[in-house]
Amino acid sequence: MYDLSITLFGITFKNPVWTASGTFGYGIEAMELYDISKLGAVVTKGISLKPREGNPPERIAETPCGMLNSIGLQNPGVEGFLKKIYPKIKHVDTHFIANVFGETEEEYLEVCLALESAEKIVAYELNVSCPNVKKGGLLFGHDLVVLGRLVEKIKAKVKKPLIVKLSPNTGSIKEFAKVCIDAGADGLVLINTLLGMKIDVKSQKPDLSTFTGGLSGPAILPIAVRMVWEVFSEFGNTVPIVGVGGIHDTDSALQHILAGASAVQVGTANFSDPLCPLRIIEGIKSYMEERKESSFKNLIGKAHRVPLSMDKYLL
């Protein structure tokens, strides 16, 4: 028997493959394609305190090996989520993690508290790549002091586990990881999208209405894997790491895992191949069978434990 289950922050997931926020909606559309209870978890589209219409079009632009998006976190707000969406997902036999965000510390906290009674929501994923209106628009995840205070404030008030999705558009990712760990975060998600831009050379204008957007897809895989590696190297098993960024097949998922991720999230790949998460689950199982690795836990961070041979570099 090959055990793909993994227990993180006190919750047992049937497998380590989750879907990433903003790429899977709330799982409702995917239910028409396959049984989403086969997934380890579904991370919801971002939920804010009040409804948001998002940015005007154009909001998505295709790029080599990926895409840019500037959706603007469109969502019905936490009340709309609980009334209209939650009843449609609470029967699904897998875990749901709520991606939450706000423009102030108070808004983040209010969203989390509103979801405390929703049993199907087992944890919160903080999207800290949002502007702090009380700090002149500086992103929460770009200021060590502000980030630490946000995590500490929410952690003190909520009962469910709190994981933080860190931005790659900062300085040392390890510094921001440490602040979250010290503030009591139960886990880290690495990484959010990278800031990018695309210009249409025919019209000579930016493709996105907001000029810049978040770059995702296979193009960012090496950056995401490097950041998972760095944080795992520094903090080991202090808190679990969830890897996201460029995951589109079994190989890319395993790179995150071997670098130190205890679970992975499939994002942009859902748009081109909705069945991608299921293929990755089966792919990881086959990988374990080939290597006679009975427990998935043994794969986490294994690249750190395999001696590096220089023979292949010698002429």
Image (tube, helix red, strand yellow):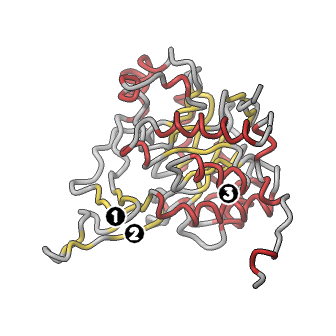
Say whether disc 1 or disc 3 marks the residue closer to the N-terminus.
Answer: 1
**Residue underneath mark 2:** 196
Mark 1, residues whose alpha carbon is within 10 Å: few (<14), some, or many (≥20)?
Answer: some
> In this orientation, which residue lies closer to the viewer: 195 or 117?
195
Residue sitting at the far bottom: 315
* x and y percentages locating residue 202 in the rendered image: 14, 75
Tell me which corner region of the image, top left, top right, bottom left or bottom right, holds residue 67.
bottom left
In this orientation, which residue lies closer to the viewer: 71 or 141?
71
- Number of on-image labels: 3
| 158 relative to 60 in the view: left or right | right
Q: Answer yes or no: is residue 133 visible.
A: no
> Is 89 drawn above or below residue 206 in the view shown?
above
Amino acid under disc 2: Gly
Three-letter amino acid code at the position of disc 3: Gly
Q: Which mark is residue 292?
A: none
Decide if residue 192 is on the left or right side of residue 13: left
Do tag 1 and tag 2 residues touch (Cβ < 8 Å)? yes
Spatial CA distance of label 1 from label 2 is 10 Å
Are the residues flagged by discs 2 and 3 in contact, CB closer than 8 Å? Answer: no
> In whole angstroms, how far apart are the C-alphas of marks 2 and 3?
26 Å
Mark 2 or mark 3: whose residue is earlier in sequence: 3
Q: In this rendered view, identify the residue nearer to me: 181 or 103.
A: 181
Q: Which mark is residue 148?
A: 3
> Is the N terminus in the top left, top right, bottom left or bottom right quadrant?
top right
Q: Could you say which is closer to the camera, residue 121 or residue 13?
A: 13
Instruction: Please report whichever mark, 1 or 2, sits nearer to the chain's N-terminal start.
Output: 1
Q: Callout 2: few (<14), some (14-19), or many (20+) C-alpha neighbours within 10 Å?
A: some
Residue 265 falls in which quadrant of the image? top right
